[in-house]
Amino acid sequence: MFKIYVKAARLRTLPLSVSGIIVGSFLAASHGYFNWLICGLALLTTIGFQIISNFANDYGDGIKGTDNNMDRIGPKRAIQSGEISPAQLLRTIKITSAITLVIAIFLIYIAFGKEDFINLLLFFVLGIASIAAAVKYTMGKKAYGYSGFGDFFVFLFFGLLSVCGSYYLFSKKLDFAIFLPAISIGLLSIGVLNLNNMRDSVSDAKSGKNTIVVKIGVEFAKYYHYYLLIASFLFALLYSFIFYKSWHQLLFLLAYVPIGKHFLVVYRNKRPVLLDPELKKLALSTFLFALLFGLGTFLAS
């Protein structure tokens, strides 16, 4: 049974989920702010949010019939395969949410102490909002993933909140320049979701899951994908040029070699169902970008 839950947690998505924390932590360290305990707790909290989202996505799409044996392209999900019942998975979502919230509370207490009530309250609310966003993507009657708002929330939580929020945990202040790499991480994260939605466009349309891809069609979704990848590159490059100190800040360009190859695969693709392997490639390329961008910025400081 444990292996079934590990499978439902979709561990391959975790590198993408921590990419924003890695960038935010490196940026903070490059500015003289860092704490290993805060970094570790932030990573654990983010991983918890991602696992909640994965469980909730399995549950929501499973009970709505979006994941089914006839139209499902990617790997079978837990409820779809019958390995876990909806009641079991719902209980697991509640337990995982409670554990993650405890870790998040410990994180914000370590970061701000008991005296900084405003920041304690702010980040507690953000923690609750993150759990709610993870759950409501596909769960419930008004799941935002079924209305085409998934891209916006991925950008907000995987990009802006992840990078800027983690930076703030260390520094206790917000440098608006870090929004540039935060935007890059957010755009690449949307790219992974867009690939998933292109792959599942047929089954999503049948089940009433009106993603952006379903709304604009696969052909326009490919152009949307190109813009996401190119814009992510430009925002990262802009930050490096504005704050250029040494060649290390251009290390992130290496990550755009596999991203460029991925770009060509999407450009040449005629059958969206064949894009499934590209999800892992782009997710890992985003993780590589986070490591190289963060390390390069730190080495240049």
Image (spheres, rainbow, N blue to C red):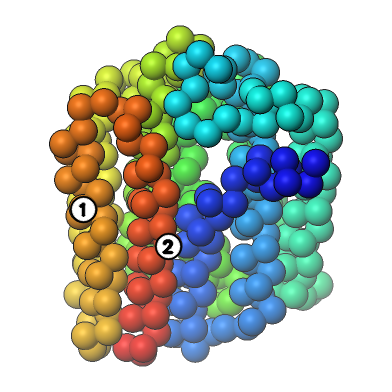
Compared with residue 28, is residue 96 higher up or lower down, i.e. above or below?
A: above
Compared with residue 240, is residue 181 higher up or lower down, i.e. above or below?
A: above
The residue at 53%/51% (across/down) is 12
Quadrant occupied by the C terminus: bottom left
Q: Residues within 10 Å of mark 1 (few under 14, many from 20)?
A: few
Q: Residues within 10 Å of mark 2 (few under 14, many from 20)?
A: many
Which residue position is annotated with label 1? 261
- Give the image quarter of residue 287: bottom left
Q: Looking at this view, is 141 or 6 the one in front?
A: 6
Q: Position of residue 67 (x, y in %)?
A: 56, 21
Which residue position is annotated with label 2? 287
Label located before the other in sequence (1 or 2): 1
Say which amino acid is labelled 1: Lys
Q: Looking at this view, is 163 or 58 the one in front?
A: 58
Q: Is residue 253 left or right of residue 107?
A: left
Q: Position of residue 283 (x, y in %)?
A: 41, 52
